[in-house]
Image: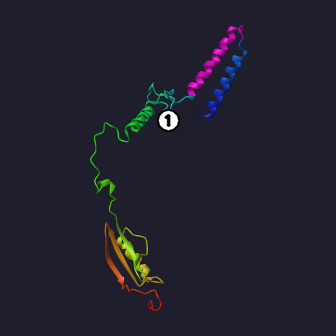
Amino acid sequence: MNHAQLTALGRALRLVGEHGEALTADTPDARLHEVKADLRRALDLLDESVTTGAVTTRCPEHPNGPVDESAPDLCLLCETRRRAARRSELHGSRPQSDPVSPAPSRYGVRSDRPQPQQRWLPELWNGREWQLCGTPRRDRREAEQYLAAQRRGSRPAMAYRLVHEFTDYEVLRIWGTPVQVDIEPMGNL
């Protein structure tokens, strides 16, 4: 209902209300015909402003849904949901009519396993171990270009490597020579 329809309907209903207050036992027929015309005008305005059908249930979620006379809100859809919930409370989580399913596999089913992803991991040697030095890449050429830029940078590491990750790890290429560096100054004496 738009604003103009709302305003016109409100005006027509107020006029009908004024007619109702002015009615008495000796109201002339001419005045009653005027009330009848105003009532028809208000009903016509109401018909124009209503766009949907009359509600069939008292359910706010499904006002025009199927009707179940035994439901408190007359909504068959919500009552079906409530009945299923009551059944599962009585019979446990699994309905009694279901056949017994086999024991789950210890390996899981295909949809439970993640899909393998292929990535290239740029790593640098920090003196004791290999560590990730950039974000894993989906493109090998892009990962190699990233490592080339790192080697040309102002503070390159001793060694870099590119690791291929595809459900397992495989070292593809190593740049430089990783040397074990003792972090204690005098050789741990």
Q: Nearer the viewer, residue 162 or 93?
A: 93
Residue for point 47% across, 84% down: 155
- Residue on which the image places disc 1: 61
Q: Nearer the viewer, residue 8 or 21?
A: 21
186 left or right of 1 in image:
left
**Horizontal and vertical percent position of residue 82:** 44, 34
Q: Nearer the viewer, residue 8 or 140?
A: 140
- In the picture, the quarter occupied by the C terminus is bottom left
Residue for point 59% across, 21% down: 43
User: Is residue 106 shown above or below 6?
Assistant: below
Q: Where are the magenta residues, as a range?
A: 24-48
Task: Tell which residue pokes out farthest to the left in this image.
Answer: 102
Residue for point 63% across, 34% down: 3
Is 39 part of what is drawn in magenta?
A: yes
Is 143 part of what is drawn in magenta?
A: no
Name which residue type carries label 1.
Glu
Q: Main secondary structure of the magenta part?
A: helix
| Label 1, residues with CA under 10 Å away: few <14, some 14-19, many ≥20 | few
**Horizontal and vertical percent position of residue 86:** 42, 35
